[in-house]
Amino acid sequence: MSTVRAGNQAALVVVDVQVSVVAEAWETTRVVNNVARVVERAREQLVPVIWVQHDDKELVRDSPSWQLVPELVPAQGEARIYKHFESSFEETGLEAELARIGATHIVLAGAATNWCIRATAYGALDRGYDLTLVKDAHTTKSVELENGPKIEAPSVVADLNVAMKWISYPGRKNGIATAEEVDFATPGGVR
């Protein structure tokens, strides 16, 4: 059984908006602009922003393709978390950073929807955090299956948005909101 986090301190967690991760993703420009907008809003409201970056044998740390997209620049003092698995929680310092700032409510944006955003969203809920998925600030690429069918990126994004709106966990609040309507003070809610 997970520990439900008491309180109402939000943190914005921006996952893997890296050059090669979003290079061929669905509506990258729109999504990156929405991520930038929610980052701006978080900073205006003094909500901590945490930046997560993935690396592996294909996405080599410190390479040009590993960098965050140029439109997104962490501010001085904003936490940086580096990961090797899809979930931003697995074998990283994310939980320690969230504990340090007293976060109980994660506002989540980034890429890729079907891998790292999904794993991080469920990881947050499993660990007792409230969650708001920024429904217009995450993206992925379409997936071609081995036997021929293709799962289109808009369907992947819509599927996770529906799941995060309707799934329920005891003692936690979760939901979706656009970059403009996220209410950092209301877990799972909009302003």
Image (cartoon, rainbow, N blue to C red):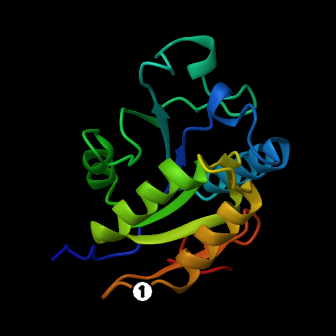
Question: Which quadrant of the figure has residue 132?
Answer: bottom right
Q: Is residue 109 toward the left or the right of residue 4 in the image?
A: right
**In this image, 102 relative to 74: left or right?**
left
Pick the front one: 145 or 89: 145
**Which quarter shows the N terminus?**
bottom left
Above/below status of 111 relative to 178: above
Going 63% across and 71% down the picture, which residue do you hit? 159
Would you say 18 lies left or right of 55 here? Answer: right
Residue at (47% x, 70% y) in the render: 131
Q: What secondary structure is found at the residue carrying circle 1?
A: loop
Q: Is 172 left, or right, of 68 in this rendering?
A: left
- Relative image position of residue 58 (x, y in whole percent): 50, 20
- In the rendered image, residue 90, in percent from the top left (x then y), is placed at 28, 45
Above or below residue 33? Residue 76 is above
Q: Quadrant of residue 4?
A: bottom left
**Residue 48 visible, this angle:** no
Q: Quadrant of residue 160?
A: bottom right
Task: Tell me which amino acid carries mark 1.
Answer: Ser
Q: Residues within 10 Å of mark 1 (few under 14, many from 20)?
A: few
Residue on which the image places disc 1? 168
x, y percent for residue 9: 41, 67
Q: Which quadrant is the C terminus positioned in?
A: bottom right
Front residue (pair 179, 118): 118
